[in-house]
Image (spheres, grey):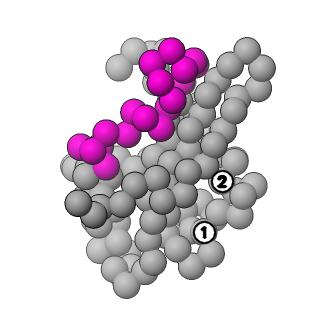
Amino acid sequence: MSEDNLYLGKAGEDKAAVFLTANGYKILKRNYKTKLGEIDIIARDRETICFVEVKSRTSERFGLPQEAISKSKQRQIAKVALMFLKENNLLDSFTRFDAVSVLFGPDKPKLELIKNAFDLTG
């Protein structure tokens, strides 16, 4: 991954964390890493633990940011989420997979919260 992409990803995650907090989420963990992968943000939205994938882009030329969350990425996030729940004795918790789309443009960034961005059925 290029240095520009790393910077864009970090900037997007920083904006997303502030945005989520402003929308009532309590950030529990950022960049939770395991041998299976990483979850950008783990937060609580009332009684629900949310595993949040942040996708950032500078234009819509290659589609919307959230369209980059592939089925394989969804499965990877789910596996890492399960590890987090087990480690923290939270297996009985309500959970949800959310996404934050960050589109950096000429003006201020446009952020969109997608609750229940994906589930694990099918």
User: Is 65 contained in the magenta span?
Assistant: yes
Q: Secondary structure at mark 2?
A: helix
Circle 2 residues within 10 Å: few <14, some 14–19, many ≥20: many
User: Is 53 contained in the magenta span?
Assistant: no
Q: Secondary structure at mark 1?
A: strand
Image position, residue 85 (x, y; %): 35, 72
Label 2 vs label 1: CA separation? 9 Å
Relative to the observer, which residue lies in front, 30 or 58? 58
Which amino acid does the dot numbered 2 rest on?
A: Leu
Image position, residue 56 (x, y; %): 53, 30
Left or right of residue 62, residue 56 in this image: right
Location of mark 1 (residue):
45
Position above or below: 42 against 73: below
The answer to whether residue 40 is visible is: no
Image position, residue 57 (x, y; %): 53, 24
Which amino acid does the dot numbered 1 rest on?
A: Asp
Q: Residue at x 43, y 80 (%)?
A: 93
Left or right of residue 75, residue 39 in this image: right
Image position, residue 121 (x, y; %): 27, 63
The answer to whether residue 24 is visible is: yes
Circle 1 residues within 10 Å: few <14, some 14–19, many ≥20: some
Label pair 2/1, CB-CB below 8 angstroms: no
Position above or below: 100 against 48: above
The label number, if any, that marks residue 20 in the structure image: 2
Q: Residue at x 29, y 74 (%)?
A: 86
Stretch of the chain drawn in magenta: 57-74
Q: Residue at x 40, y 50 (%)?
A: 39
